DNA sequence: CATGATATCTGACTAAAGTCAGACATCATG
DNA sequence: CATGATGTCTGACTTTAGTCAGATATCATG
């Protein structure tokens, strides 16, 4: 009935009017949208004036006036940046925090209302995650993190849960050779998390060993981020980290129940090799020389 | 990592900036957004001025001025409505059609660009359909149509395809008792299609018989529209149509491979009865007295 | 055919958003 | 410490969007 482009455009129309409705609800607090947006940006932790201006795409003159109007209303205070007195930082006053909380309540109510009208929340949220990830694709960052960080542990938890679903025999991490965190930290290795906004959507570990090679472990991409070629980006980033650490040979193991992983490795210069460990889960083994 | 409300809000943020970008691309043609929107509404076949005003939510004074500016630019012409000289209808001139085509090209390019950056189109489009249906929920209409209409045939095709996927033995419509179109037209029966925008997203047929009852056939809801309680709305509408036609007893057959259908019938006053036909596919039979 | 309702248009506004040039203080650099 | 770059601010605009009170023409109705 509809070709793909028409389907995207139907989505655009639907979403345009929904965004308009959200904006209108913000006007209910008697403040123009521009000022409300600046207040909310500050409330969400963007204190640096230049950063807010950049985020909202505002002219410096307009930005200055919006800040002044919020200041006059007693909602924010501005001060010189402590490292650079040309820059200004804005913070909410007590009244500003109250006002910000009111906007937050509006946003939350809107979101809850939307969820409440739908009886299949899981599918709806999964669709929203997928689209949010696709739309913010250029803003996904790959950050090297401690494998014990909250973000890393979240990714690993999701990864193990997915293996449990996809392996016929399930997955019990205690039976697998769980890499020691310190093997995935500099200088022995590395752990990279892909972040979209504040949401971790993928990870990969580089585990140093004493056997003349390092291993790639825990490559995972959130279902919502699949199709964005994030797996490849994560692999490229780990290989770059490995080169930086002077690692010349990489190995990894995987399972044929994860065909997309095998395809990725084969298409990016990895060569299948015989089993090189006795982990019970993998049945495919690869190697790549850097 | 994220609770449902935060996930919805992440989606809102992503979408707000995407919508803003689309608006900005429209400004590239040197015309304010308001005028561009009116031009596009006319291009998409909304000729009646009041209808456009209602669709875009514009004040009559503003609308009038926007029309005048488009007219001054030679892009549209307005004339009195042929049935009611108070109303005006707007049509594109040759130059207007050219300009509209340029906007269409921008929209299409944007949609294509978005699709092109994603390697799992099917999943992305399914997510967009789902969200578009959820967002336009209040604008879904149930329209009685000829079962031979394009919209009805599209729904039936999707319905058969889904049965093929969900029945272990597949589904061959020629083996099933395919109802005659005239049995699903007034005065013997009815066929209702649920429309979202111009997209059919569900259907149900009421088939008149000569056995003292009518049958509900072909109840289908598009995957993108599930969770909106559309199945129930469709059933309510058919039952209303049946009452109108003086039908006192309804029957239907279904299959236990479609558990959501069974749940719907049981929760809306249907009573399971013994097999009443020799169709090879159904294994569950229901009846409801009106 | 008088009357009230409806659809559009015009004039006279206001508010919000955005633009631009230049002023000013501060910073980084040689 | 002179110089050019940077970040913010102010004043003086323009454009866009939106509001509101009539004016005008037409329609539906009794």
Image (cartoon, coloured by chain):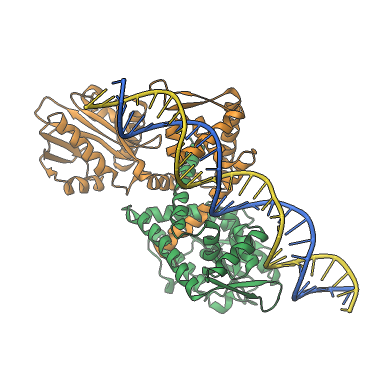
Chain colours: A orange, B green, C yellow, D blue
Instruction: Tell me: D20 left or right of A214.
Output: right
Q: Is residue A221 above or below residue A191?
A: below
Q: Position of residue B185 (x, y in %)?
A: 60, 76
Quadrant for residue B107, please give it: bottom left
**Residue B255 seen in the figure:** yes
Q: Is residue A224 above or below residue B276?
A: above
Quadrant showing the N terminus of chain B: top left
Q: Is residue A121 above or below residue B95?
A: above
Viewer-closest of A34 and A4: A34
Q: Nearer the viewer, residue B70 or B123?
A: B70
Which residue is depicted at the point 41% across and 20% down? Answer: A82
**Residue B144, horizontal then vertical, whole percent:** 60, 70
Quarter of the picture holding the C terminus of chain B: bottom right
| Location of residue B270 (image quadrant) | bottom right
Residue B94 in picture, x, y percent from top left: 48, 76
Q: Nearer the viewer, residue D28 or A192?
A: D28
Left or right: residue B175 compared with residue B220: left
Task: Residue at 19%, 29% (x, y): give it.
Answer: A207
Horizontal and vertical percent for residue A202? 32, 38
Count of all numbered marks drawn on residues in the image: 0
Front residue of B215/B82: it is B82
User: At x 44% / y 50%, what residue is drawn?
Assistant: B21
Tell me if I can see residue B256 in this picture: no
Q: Residue at x 21, y 35 (%)?
A: A238
């Amino acid at each position: 009935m509809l070709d793909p482009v028409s389907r995207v455009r139907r989505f655009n129309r639907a979403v345009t009017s929904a965004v308009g409705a959200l904006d209108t609800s913000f006007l209910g607090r008697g403040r123009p949208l521009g000022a409300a947006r600046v207040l909310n940006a500050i409330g969400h932790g963007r204190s640096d004036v230049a950063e807010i201006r950049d985020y909202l795409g505002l002219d410096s003159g307009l930005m200055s006036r919006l800040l002044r109007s919020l200041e006059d209303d007693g909602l924010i205070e501005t001060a010189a940046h402590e490292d650079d007195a040309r820059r200004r930082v804005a913070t909410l006053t007590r009244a500003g925090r109250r006002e910000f909380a009111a906007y937050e309540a509006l946003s939350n109510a809107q979101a809850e209302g939307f969820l409440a009208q739908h009886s299949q929340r899981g599918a709806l949220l999964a669709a929203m995650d997928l689209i949010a990830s696709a739309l913010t694709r250029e803003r996904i960052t790959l950050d090297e993190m401690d494998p014990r960080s909250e973000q890393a542990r979240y990714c690993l938890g999701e990864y193990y849960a997915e293996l449990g679903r996809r392996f016929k025999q399930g997955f019990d991490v205690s039976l697998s050779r769980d890499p020691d965190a310190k093997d995935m930290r500099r200088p022995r290795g590395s752990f990279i998390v892909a972040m979209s906004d504040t949401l971790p959507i993928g990870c990969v570990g580089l585990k140093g060993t004493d056997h003349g090679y390092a291993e790639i472990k825990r490559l995972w991409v959130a279902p919502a981020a699949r199709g964005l070629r994030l797996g490849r980006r994560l692999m490229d980033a780990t290989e770059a980290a490995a080169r930086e650490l002077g690692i010349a040979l990489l190995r990894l193991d995987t399972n044929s129940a994860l065909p997309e992983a095998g395809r990725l490795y084969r298409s990016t210069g990895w060569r299948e090799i015989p089993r090189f460990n006795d982990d019970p889960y993998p049945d495919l083994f690869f190697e790549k020389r850097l």
